[in-house]
Amino acid sequence: MVFKVEKSQAVNNLRVSDSVGDVDRELMPLLEKINNLPDFYTTSSCGGRVVLMQDLGSKKLDNFVGKWHRKVSMEDVFPLFKPCDGLLWFRYESPILHVMARSLDKASWFLHLCRESGFKRSGIQSVKDERILIEVLSTERIDVPIMSEGRKLVSEEYINFLIEQANIKYDLGTHKLDRLEKNLG
């Protein structure tokens, strides 16, 4: 009974988040497909993102300088490449989904589909009564410091290379999400 109530709340929260633009639109068909399965529901998701992050040595102090849930261009990134305190990181973070399963058997079935779809780093994060938390994650990632204490560490040409690589990884992540949606039937 707990699972059913929490699923209803999670699906309602997703609808509210979607209505205010807090959900990656291209993920909605996959999220709806998962949420329509009787033994599963989603709790959070990201379709992949490119980030410029100011690292000031503490997660509480870190600051997003730029964040895009899509492919990016030099025109997006370069204007934000300005001197700042701490480290400035260029990151690509692969798609991630958090999915609740009703049982270990159901979680195992879902993880098998995830791995067949290319999400090799997927696994069970926690096990509680009627709630098995699955994290769907891939291996694509870029983490590169590009500035330190206002001093550029890399050339404009290298930033362009990072952008190209991030866009390739974004496309790969999108392809894996599409495969997962297809594999779910």
Image (cartoon, rainbow, N blue to C red):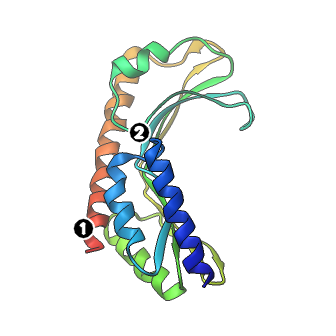
In the displayed structure, would residue 146 be above or below residue 33?
Answer: above
Q: Secondary structure at mark 1?
A: helix
Q: Secondary structure at mark 2?
A: loop
**Residue at the image point whose x is 34% and y is 68% from the top:** 33
Drawn side of residue 110 relative to residue 12, left or right: left
At which x and y percent is residue 76? Answer: 38, 21
Q: Which residue bears the numbered disc 2?
A: 69
Residue 44 visible (yes or no): no
Image-quadrant location for residue 128: bottom right
- Please tell me how many numbered marks the rendered image carries: 2
At which x and y percent is residue 45? Answer: 48, 54
**Residue at the image point whose x is 42% and y is 69% from the top:** 35
Q: Which residue bears the numbered disc 1?
A: 182
Q: Quadrant of the C terminus?
A: bottom left
At which x and y percent is residue 179? Answer: 26, 63
Q: Sequence-wise, which precedes: disc 2 or disc 1? A: 2
